[in-house]
Amino acid sequence: MSELRALITDIEGTTTPVTFVHQVLFPYAAKHLPDYVRAHALDPAVTAALKETAALDARAGVSVDAAINVLLEWIAADRKATPLKALQGLVWRKAYESGEVKSPIYDDVVPVLESAKRAGLSLHVFSSGSVEAQHLLFGHSDKGDLRPLFTGWFDTTTGPKLEAESYRLIAAQIGCAPAQAAFLSDHPGEIAAAHQAGMTVCRIDREKPADFSATDPAGTPVAGSFSVAARLIGLPA
Ligand SMILES: [Mg+2]
């Protein structure tokens, strides 16, 4: 087995509770979006998003308030329209930067990342959240600014998380063989894809106790925490 040179991690359900996005970030954006849009209606990014909103729904073209009503309808319907996503991103940026929102990182994550880095591995993120959202999340966490730990940030512009090819591309961009990279995620399909690409993998199951370890039917390891995962995939201590 080649020695590990890189560690790649998923975010949601792996380093951070899945509930954070749905129970904190989305409700926050819904609550603060109307005031944000009114206060920043003349900012180029907001103007562009409002124009795009009106292009998708003519009712939004009448006034800023009419546009806000359409946006709130989309939020209620869980519609992932591009201008809505752009505005939510702006509201979150402000919330993170003002310190009003901090992303929770499981306690076992940072010690493992730090010791992997000390051992010479490079650290990377692969998440379906945009690279910009990844920077915000790790830059404003309840464990401080974790961005300096990471050297590579990958989102689905590299490729879908369920396709082996994405993991081959990531290894190539990192500059190592897939076998020299380890990938951690809570998602069995992502683990299967990375494994198929030849990466060392470990599924993180946050429903299990921290000391949990097992083997999936596919023969890949499962851990209840990063510390157990580190042991299972042979990360240097
Ligand atoms: Mg996940």
Image (cartoon, rainbow, N blue to C red):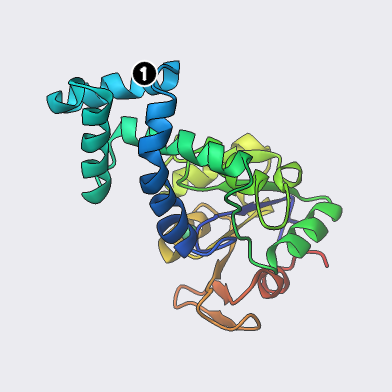
Number of dots carrying numbers: 1
Tell whether circle 1 marks a residue whose Cβ is less than 8 angstroms from ligand 1. no
Which quarter of the image is occupied by the C terminus? bottom right
On screen, residue 70 above or below 146: above
Q: Residue at x 42, y 43 (%)?
A: 32
Viewer-nearest residue: 66 or 233: 66
Which residue occupies the extreme right position in the image? 118
Residue 221 or 47: which is nearer the viewer? 47
Q: Nearer the viewer, residue 28 or 148?
A: 28
Q: Residue at x 75, y 47 (%)?
A: 149
Q: Nearer the viewer, residue 138 or 96?
A: 96
Q: Position of residue 231 (x, y in %)?
A: 72, 73
Q: In the image, is residue 162 above or below residue 228?
A: above
Label 1's element?
Answer: helix
Q: Residue 73 in the image: state x and y as whole percent.
A: 21, 43
Q: Amino acid at mark 1?
A: Thr
Q: Quadrant of residue 83?
A: top left
**Residue for badge 1:** 47
Q: Position of residue 131 (x, y in %)?
A: 54, 37
Q: Quadrant of the N terminus?
A: bottom right
Residue 185 location in percent, x, y?
53, 61
Locate residue 46: give its quadrant: top left
Q: Judge left or right: residue 130 versus residue 141.
A: left
How many C-alpha atoms fall within 10 Å of the one at disc 1: few (<14), some, or many (≥20)? some
Q: Is residue 185 above or below residue 90?
A: below
Residue at 19%, 26% (x, y): give it.
60
Determine if residue 162 is in view. Answer: no
Inspect this view and state whether residue 30 appears.
yes
